[in-house]
Structures are given as C-alpha cells and as structure tokens.
Amino acid sequence: MPKHAMLELAITLPPRGSGAVMRVLHRELRAAILDGRLKPGLRLPSTRILADSWGVSRNTVMGAYDLLLSEGYLFARHGAGTYVAETLPLRTERASIIDETETEPDARLNALWRSPPPYLGKPWVSSMASSHAIFRLGVPDTASFPFHIWRRLLARSLRALAKVPAAYVEAQGRPLLREAIANHVSFARAVACRPEDVVVTAGTQQAFDLLARILVTAGRSTVALEDPGYPPLRAAFVAAGAKLAPVPVDAEGLVVERLPADTRVICVTPSHQFPLGVAMSMRRRAELLEFARVNGAVVIEDDYDGEFRFGATPRDALQTLDRSGSVFYVGTFSKSLFPGIRLGFVVAPPWARRALITAKQCADWHSPVMEQDALAAFISEGHLARHVRKMRKLYSERRELMMSSLQTHFSPWLESIPSSGGMHLTALVRESIDIETIVRSARQRNMDVRSLRSFWDDGNGQAGLVMGYGSSGPEALTEGLLQLRRLFPASAPARVVWGSSRLVAESR
Amino acid sequence: MPKHAMLELAITLPPRGSGAVMRVLHRELRAAILDGRLKPGLRLPSTRILADSWGVSRNTVMGAYDLLLSEGYLFARHGAGTYVAETLPLRTERASIIDETETEPDARLNALWRSPPPYLGKPWVSSMASSHAIFRLGVPDTASFPFHIWRRLLARSLRALAKVPAAYVEAQGRPLLREAIANHVSFARAVACRPEDVVVTAGTQQAFDLLARILVTAGRSTVALEDPGYPPLRAAFVAAGAKLAPVPVDAEGLVVERLPADTRVICVTPSHQFPLGVAMSMRRRAELLEFARVNGAVVIEDDYDGEFRFGATPRDALQTLDRSGSVFYVGTFSKSLFPGIRLGFVVAPPWARRALITAKQCADWHSPVMEQDALAAFISEGHLARHVRKMRKLYSERRELMMSSLQTHFSPWLESIPSSGGMHLTALVRESIDIETIVRSARQRNMDVRSLRSFWDDGNGQAGLVMGYGSSGPEALTEGLLQLRRLFPASAPARVVWGSSRLVAESR
C-alpha cells in the first residue's frame, strides 16, 4: 500500500476526540521519518499550522510531536521549532544515493549529452563580497529610491488584479507597460519606437538569452562580442552554441574593422562600454551600422546605464541612427530602479518581433503581472524620470570624487579611462605593480573591486581595476579609497605629497 | 551634429526665464517629430511631467506644446493628452522600412538561421476567450484568495528590502523560499527534499524550458511526451531540438511499454494526467521508474495541480518512489496562488543541480526578490496550506456539479473520464456528433471549452471536450452547462427526460 502524502492524512484520520487521531498521526509521521520522506534536519511546521491544515486540534498534534520527541525521532530547538532528528537508527536506501559532496555534475549528465555541455560551468557569482561592500559593480543606490511610492503602486496594482479573474497574460508584456516604455525611451534615449515594438523581459539577462536563442544557429553563427566585455552576455551566447569572436575595443569603442566577415550578430555597449567606460564615436557607429547593412548582420545594443550620462553631449543610440532594421535595443530597470525587480525590455525590429515573443512565451510565458503594472504606473506618472534625474546628480558627484582621487592619489600606478556616465570607472595599470594581489587584498577587506583581467576573453589582456560607485555614498567611497590606497606601494614618486588627511580633504 | 536625446535637452537649455528655453524646446521637439524619433500617434508626457524631468517651468513646456499644436505637429485629445500628429508633410526614411503588416517573420530571420527555426511559430494563446469566460482551463479561482494577506506580506518584504543595499541574489532562489518549498512538498506531497534540492523558476514553463536546455542534445535526444498532452511543454522541447516521441495514455496513465528504447527524457503528469485527468497506476509508476533506471533515462514529473485531490487515496509522487535519482519534480504556484505570480520550482536530483542553476542564471539571473520573499512567508506562516484546504473543498464541489450534470444531461453524447482532482474535466465523445462545431459555437458564446483534438500530437486522436471548472463559481458553471447543453442536438434518446429547470435543480 502506498504511503500517504502528509497533508492528505486528514482524510483518513479517525473521528475527532477518539484519541485514535493522535496515534495515527504519530504512526504516519514516524513512518515518514523512517523511510526518508521527512529528512533529517527538516524543520516541521508548527503545531498550530499543522492542526489548522489537517483540521484536527492543536493538542492532538502536540501529543504526536511529544511522543516522537520522547522517542528521539524529533528534536526541539528552544524557540526555533521542531526538527527531524539528524541521527536515526535506520538509514534509507534513498539517502545513500544522494551525493552530499556534489563536486561536479556526475557522469549521468555527460551521458545524456553528446555535444559539448554548455551548462556544466559554475553559475557566475553576482558579487563575492557582501551587499554592504564598497565599490560594488553594476548595482545602483537604492537608499534614495522612493520605496513608499513603489509600495503604493504595487498595492494599487494588486487591488486591481484582485478584482478580475486570474489569467495568463500577453507574453510580449502588459500593453500599458509597453506604452510607458515606448514613451520613456523615445524621450530619454531618442529611440524611435511604438508600444508594439517593445518586448518585456526578465531583465537584460533574459533579453540576451532570448535574442541568442532566436538569432544563433548552434555551431554555425559567428557572434562578435566586445573584448573586454560582460561575462554573463558571453554565457548566454555560449549556451546557444554561438561561435564567439572577441573584438577589441579602443578609445572610440568597438574596432569595427576587426569584425570577422561572417559575423551574424554584434553585441555592443555603445553609450558606455562595459567595462572600459568609453563611448562609441559617431564614426564607429556609422561604420558598425554600415557593416551590419552590407553583411546582413544584426546589432544588439545594450544600453544598460544609458540614463546616467553626465554633462557631455549624449550620442544617439544606434537604434536611433539605424535605417535598415538591424538593431535590437536592450534596456533594463535594474539600474534605474533596482535589480530585484527583474524587468527589462527589447525594442525589436518588426521582422523579428514574432519570433522574439514566441521565444519569451516558451521561456517563461510572461513576466509577473503585478510588477509590470506597477512599473507602468511608475513610468507614466513621471516617477522614473524624476528618480533618474536625482540619481544622475548623485552619481555624477560620486564619479567626480572617484576621478579626482584616482588622478591625485593613484596616478603613479593607475590611469583612469575618461568616461562620462554610468556607475563605474575603470583604470588601467600604469606601472608594473601586481594588481591581482591588490585586488585580492581589497576583496578580503570588503572592497568589491575587480581586476580588469576577468573581463578579457582570454583572461590575459591589459591589467586594470574596475570599481563601481553606484551603491555607496561619498563618505563610504572616500573611506574606501583611503583603504584601497594603503594596499598600493607606500613609497610614491616624489611629486605626490601623500597624507591620509589630505586624501579625504581633496577628494570631496 | 548628432541630435540630442530628449531627456538630456535640459543640459543644453538656455537660462530660465529668458524665453529662449521655450524656443529651444519647440525646435528640438519639432526636429524629433520630423526625423521620426517621436513617431506619429505617440502620446507625449504631460506638461507637468516634462517640466519636472527637464527642470523647467510648466508654462515653458505648455508654450512649446501650444506652438506645435498650432503648427499641426501635435494634436490633443480632450482629456486624454497630447499626441504626435498621424499625418505629417515629411515621411522619414525610417518609417518606410517598417513593415506595418507584419505577417511572417521575414527572410532576414531565415537567412540568419541555417537549421530549422524553432521560433517561427506563433506564440500560443493562453485563452482565446475573455478572462470572464466560463470553463477556462488551467486557471484557479482567485475570488477566495486572501489578497489582503498577500499585500501585507509584499509590503513587509519590500520594507525589508528597502533597508539593505540592492543586489543580484542567488540564481537558485532565496534560501527562505527554498526552505518553505521543501517543507511544503515534504508534507503536502511526500516529496523527499531539502532546501538545497529546490531550484526556484518562473512558473512551470521556465522549469520545462530549463530542463529541456540541460537534458536535450539538439537533434539527438528522444523525449517522450504523453499523447494527448500539454502543448506548451511540447514547445519547450521543440525549441531545444528534441526528437519528440508521443506515447499513448490509457486509464492507467502513460503506456510505459510504448516508450522507444532510446528515450532519454520522459515527461509525465502522473497525479492528474493533462488533459485526460486519469491518475497513473502504481503498476505503471513502478514500470516507468524501472524503465528510467535500466535505460539511463530521466523522468520529468509535472505535478501542476497535485494539491487539489479529492477523496480518493492519493498516490505517492514518482519522486517519492524513485530510488535512482532519475526524477525531476516540477511544481507551480500558478494554481495554488495565481498565474500572475510566475513562480514555480524544480526538485532536482543532486547530479543535475549545478547545471540547472547555471541554466537558470543564464536565462534570467534570478526570479524577482520581493515576490520570492513574500511567498516564503505565505508558505511558512501556513497561509498556503489553509488556502489550499479551502480551495480543495470548493473545487471538489464544482467537480461534483460538473460530473453530475455531464452524467445526467450529456450522457447520450459525452462520457466523462473519472478523475479525482484538479480543476478540469475531460469527456470523450460517445456518439458521432460534430464536437468541433459545438466547441466553436460555445467559444463564440464566451465558453472557453476546448476540443480534445487540440491536445493530440497529430491533432487527430479521439474526439472530446475539455472543460475547466477552477475559475467559475457554481452558479456560473450551472448557467454555462445549461447554455452548453443547448448547443447539443435537441432530441436526445428517450431515456433522458430533459428540462432546463431540472438541470439547475439536479446539478447542485
């Protein structure tokens, strides 16, 4: 006879008040523990919850728990609930087949695959340092985010949803959100688009993944990526089976003349190259679009922090300049709101739209409804524009602080790359110091700085330092720069007069 | 000189109060309309929002808008905002290349692909009927959902999130949610698992998609699917390049002996076969697990509505019975909460876990943080168990109503398949009536009934009717059955005494 699933026990329990209920509960729980359905270390629901979900009295459940506790099948942690005992007389057959060490996916997965397994790699880490670390990369400051407004809009969306029958909705994205996004990018980035050109995605990562899936033929399509570049983008195209062509970047952005002739897809960050921070020149933009037109290639324009440009004349998006329907414009709300929202979008040329929507539906049907609706209101009521304007000012000040400190106190070793936007800075190593050791030391001291090496395709390009300034305020950045400076050689060339008190004073 | 992105105009605007600001705004807006950056029909932001985001006075923006209105570049809809005019003297080059008709993805996409393009299909529709239709399939009733509790838990999660720096989080899913899920399925479905065995996904669809991506070698792997079965599941495996093997289902579930010997992946719905509704017998479960063990195949167990079983002895999940680490157990909160939440999970064997997590990170990094945290609290505080218990009673009553009506009033034509759970019923066509015509008529009358034909692999299996009863209350279902009955032949065999008043009376 098959064992009963626990929640369904209520159905076969004897009548209440007979005392038999407790005995059945006890027997079934013990059986479940012994045969491994309830695992060692599992925390049991509270007696209140269990009594409620089984429709029995709480005393009955407590009686069964007490018996199991006295028999050693359960143990209680004071104030922290009741757990299945870690050591039991019997080990189940099941437990023995579970590989507790879990070093590598086992031969099983290799046996299932016959072509190179794209998912055998480790998931990349978002940040090795804690979320309180300084210089975190790609993470915005949410201390100034109007969470009270966001909470109000979420509550409003939820109230509206509660009034209509539940439903699966449009894979392309909620119409009001697509309208809001179309307006936003038309105004903020001069990207010409209509609501029907927009496909809502789960952040930039899903945009890359879906585009890789519709644009790449495994084993055949050559995809050009900026080198250095963004590793998670590379991961999406590797998974799709693309032949990757790393292409160098100089002070004008991607070196278009180095694109292989058979390139089918070109991924670029023209506003603010990741990680170097340079903007692609107008000349290069024109060359790139011409290359795409002549060779029948498409361009994926990742405008991950395009909202945050300071002072310098902004350049039009490639999508704005394109006249041949070659450009997919990718935007995200991870930087302008916060990464936990998981919403981004693609502005797609009409010829690819249906394939992209089908891929989105195949991937996860649609993005969460409530958050889409709240974001639509957040944009269309002007909160996004207002927040971006505020943050642009804050980030601009932090960038000034960083640049000035790097130029003043790190100039013997580092040369920062001019950049006019975003939330990070990259500096090249000027002299032959061991930057990898400095990075390791810094990371041990809660500074989330990165070595530029980790962004090169072969891990072997020019050495440098990549530092985020989005998530920390000026005091923390100043303190961080001070600490970072201590990790560099103590003796600097004579022209730099060095003193920790001056660093703080000068860099503000 | 490149055109400015609109939001950045503020930077180059003349000093306030000079009158020149308005003229620059006017000139730039007109230029943007003429060169197609602002498209015909686009709704402009309100003057308040624009003034706020550009840091100019509202009067200035109104002045520029008024000028453009008088020149015919804009038009105003009373109370509905200001729009870019639909007809303009100049058409941009850009507009001419956009294919407004958009019938098929054009040759461009075909040229990029050299192997069969899996995404050229149309996205499937979730429901052709409106969300107020009767008999909707796969959609729960949310009228009884405790939205007030959900709103409170969301607000609490958001408050907690607002206090910590923003961050990208674990691709596998938030630890507290994985712990809550592990407890939930251990108790509710006797699925033995620990938090580290759980991978959180964007609903069942993403679970299928990620599993297809890690388990299928394109062009080589044979994947067995139940026939009839769930079309979106098929879509995920087609996209991964699987060789599909439709396998018949009988009253005991999947006919295991019909599995091709080279099958690598077997997708089943053992608790409540979709769409037939039968439960897989214990004998077949044992045969299936033995097949997987002997042939080195894996099983994907889709337990989409496993919480909703009524009365009959529940059978253990395949995952519970498995002793060789062959089973991936897939669960969802689309039915126990609502589909808009987009959260589900996979309980994965240890050997596949790392690949699955890497695939999840590649697909969308991680699921939204706030909703994961709120769901963790919803489960661990007992709200899910309570809600499921309440809904099980409601759905059970509706099923009784449906079964009784089908047996009493549709028995000359339909034979309902015994089923002891879930939110839908399937009936086979007993006599040679034209069920497709009846389905079409019903759908025109706002009844979301489906023809069983649409769930067969070749569209040509036995005829039948699939009806959901999850989303409608007993009054609506009774009314719907009454309307549906009118679409069947008026004259029934003599043994059925027919009267509309009796249908209502008897079926309750």
Image (cartoon, coloured by chain):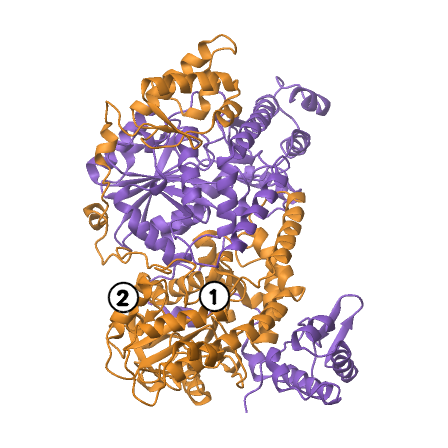
Chain colours: A orange, B purple
In this rendered view, identify the residue nearer to me: A320 or A368: A368
Q: Quadrant of the C terminus of chain B?
A: top right
Residue A278 bears which disc, if any? none
Q: Above or below — where is A357 with respect to B192?
A: below
The residue at the point 63 percent across, 76 percent down is B39
Q: Which residue is mark 1?
A: A471
Q: Chain of mark 1?
A: A
Measure the alpha-carbon separation of dots 1 and 2. 40 Å
Can see residue B422? Answer: yes
Direction bottom: furthest residue: B1
Q: Which residue is mark 2?
A: A219
Determine whether, in the image, residue B200 is placed left or right of residue B213: right
Q: Above or below — where is A503 with respect to A353?
A: below
Which of the 4 quarters of the picture holds residue A99? top left
Residue type, label 1: Ser
Determine whether, in the image, residue B434 is placed left or right of residue B73: left
Q: Are marks 1 and 2 in contact (CB under 8 Å)?
A: no
The residue at the point 20 percent across, 48 percent down is A111
Query: In x, y percent, where is residue B302?
Result: 40, 38
Nearest-to-viewer mark from 1 and 2: 1
Q: Would you call the spot at circle 1 few (<14 residues within 10 Å), some (14-19), or many (20 or more)?
A: many
Q: Quadrant of the N terminus of chain B?
A: bottom right
Which of the 4 quarters of the picture holds residue B461? top left
Determine whether, in the image, residue B315 is placed left or right of residue B21: left
Query: In x, y percent, where is residue A149?
Result: 64, 57
In this rendered view, identify the residue nearer to me: B495 or A216: A216
